[in-house]
Amino acid sequence: DGYRNTNQVSDDYRYQDGNYDAPNDGYYRGGDEPGQEEDAQSDVTEGHDEDDEVYEGEYQGIPHPDDIKEKQKKRAPAVDDEYRDRADLMAERMEDEEQLAHQYENIIEECGHGRFQWTLFFVLGLALMADGVEVFVVGFVLPSAEKDMCLSSSNKGMLGLIVYLGMMVGAVLLGGLADKLGRKQCLTISLAINAAFAFLSSFVQGYGFFLFCRLISGLGIGGTLPIVFAYFSEFLSREKRGEHLSWLCMFWMIGGIYASAMAWSIIPHYGWGFSMGTKYHFHSWRVFVLVCALPCIASLVALKFMPESPRFLLEIGKHDEAWMILKQVHDTNMRAKGEPERVFTVSYIKTPKQVDEFIEIQSSTGTWYQRWLVRITTTLKQVWDNVLYCLTAQYRMSTLMLAVVWFTMALSYYGLIVWFPDMIRYFQDEAYESRVKIFDEEEVSHFTFNFTLENQIHRNGEYRNDKFIGMKFKEVRFEDSLFEDCYFEDVRSSETFFENCTIISTVFYNTDLYEHKFINCRLINSTFMKEKEGCHIDFEEDNDFLIYLVSFLGSLSVLPGNIISALLMDKIGRIKMIGGSMLISAVCCFFLFFGNSESAMIGWQCLFCGASIAAWNALDVITVELYPTDKRATAFGILNGLCKFGAILGNSIFSSFVGITKVVPILLASSALVGGGLLALRLPETRDQVLM
């Protein structure tokens, strides 16, 4: 009995919860052996000082009853969590999140603000720039695409709205997924979808497929805005957050400037393209669509070198990964400051209690699509739970007020942004119509027309034995006229019609004078041969440089507002910034009553855009700060999706009043801004709070 084998001895000293338990067999194992130092102690008594209370039986290896109770307390939560009430678990998680929020703020302050944040700033800025470009692309290509793809008025309207519809869905869906799958992963998916379908849309020829590509492209880019702001905010300290998120908003402005400049320099160049036979045409507006995908592709490539948000990783319990990223941020900034010897002092970070966790499905369970179906449905259910969480008692009032402010801002801003160019076109059309030339009762015979006729009305004329060869009709109307023994060859026309005309023994060869252009006409012994197929485009005449200039100036005008909002965001607060900006914008709307010319409309547009940009920036900041990390991108996505819905309504409503009245659009925009601005003043101020 005195000679116990080695295995039994090793079994007796079992490691439990960080402590070695001695066997309870009555043997004393801690005595001094010959040759040991005087201060040597046994494993059982290690750690006791002279002042420690000696428990009788401790040196016989018998554990103290208090130690047993302590170990039972340590083991109890792990065993009993599944039986505890969910409310208790959530309360414990909320307490953990509050501790983490303050600790994380201190860690970010220790990491400093330097090279890492600026690198991430430019990478995410490119993604935000891609979002700004997407808003302008369709508006710029529409005048060319409508001729290239023979679009009707209803088709043009659908193409203008389809991008916003995709962005609305993408904001809610991808924003919600970013709170479950991670900021970097979802932003990568978002940019990849946008880049792929934007690239594809530049090559497709049919209207339906082009519409589908722009819809999916919009869905992809719609997820960037909520993810970008949630992602970047989690690398910023409280004192830097408002300012640097506002600087980030400048990339949306840069996207608008980039799109305007590229449209101005590419679309009018008809020769910048190629054709393959008679069916496939790659005109310069398609080159423009291709170029507009470059910021998205650049951001997608650069994002591969950026880490995941450590704040998100801590929320899902990945402590070690988060710690390594925070150390990387610290070391990168310290090396850039010339202090590489500075040590990252954080050794442990609080992680919230994990309540909902994924259970990995074994590969032997069901078929592959069944496993993926379970994963997808589980993820979508969690996203839906996050959406409902934003409407719980704690956040309901803030969410509803923010929703109203986002919606009223979008309704007025996007509505007026479309209304301004439409009004400028209306003024141009009025001026153009005022210069129309009218010809009455002219008689022309044996004459060859081989030049362009533009902005003319011919009434009660007679044309006999005339030839119309290799010419263009633009905005020409023939009313109550006679064409006899005439010959039309290689004729192109735009907004040209024949009304109540009599056409006798006339040949139309290789023209685009189709049947619908002859209104109440009598065609006697006339022949149509080899009509032109498809639609034909003339960039030099049909594209208006002024529209590109208006968009360029409108985008550039927000620069002062961006600078002012960035410098004052942390000084005057988010609430005053939103309310003040919206009320000033409402005042600017009333001056639109005096905009009776192109130059006046351009000036008021620049003033309105410059005044309203501060409200947009402050809305982005307060939306990020109001919600906890595991709900932040979801809440931002919901509100941004509502914003895009407001944009769709604004575009539809405001454009319908062009040329009819200015009163309704101006009153609607100003009243929406006043109501939203006053309501914004009741939102909670978030300037001094840490990110939860």
Image (cartoon, grey):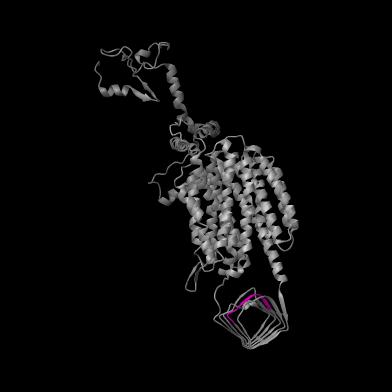
Q: Position of residue 279 (x, y in %)?
A: 49, 72
Tell me: residue 348, above or below residue 403.
above
Give the residues drawn in magenta, as a range: 469-477
Residue at 70% across, 81% down: 500
Res. 441 in view: yes
Q: Position of residue 305 (x, y in %)?
A: 44, 45
Image quadrant assignment for residue 436? bottom right
Tell me: residue 188, above or below residue 441.
above
Quarter containing the C terminus: top right
Is residue 546 part of the magenta span, yes or no?
no
Res. 692 in view: no
Image quadrant assignment for residue 445? bottom right
Residue at 53% across, 65% down: 284
Tell me: residue 189, above or below residue 24.
below
Question: What is the total number of numbered labels drawn onto the structure image?
Answer: 0
Query: Which residue, as the protein is rendered here, is positioned at the far left?
Result: 3
Tell me: residue 478, above or below residue 691.
below
Q: Position of residue 390 (x, y in %)?
A: 60, 42
Q: What secondary structure prevails in the magenta region?
A: strand
Q: Is residue 48 left or right of residue 112?
A: left
Quarter containing the N terminus: top left
Q: Nearer the viewer, residue 637 or 26?
A: 637
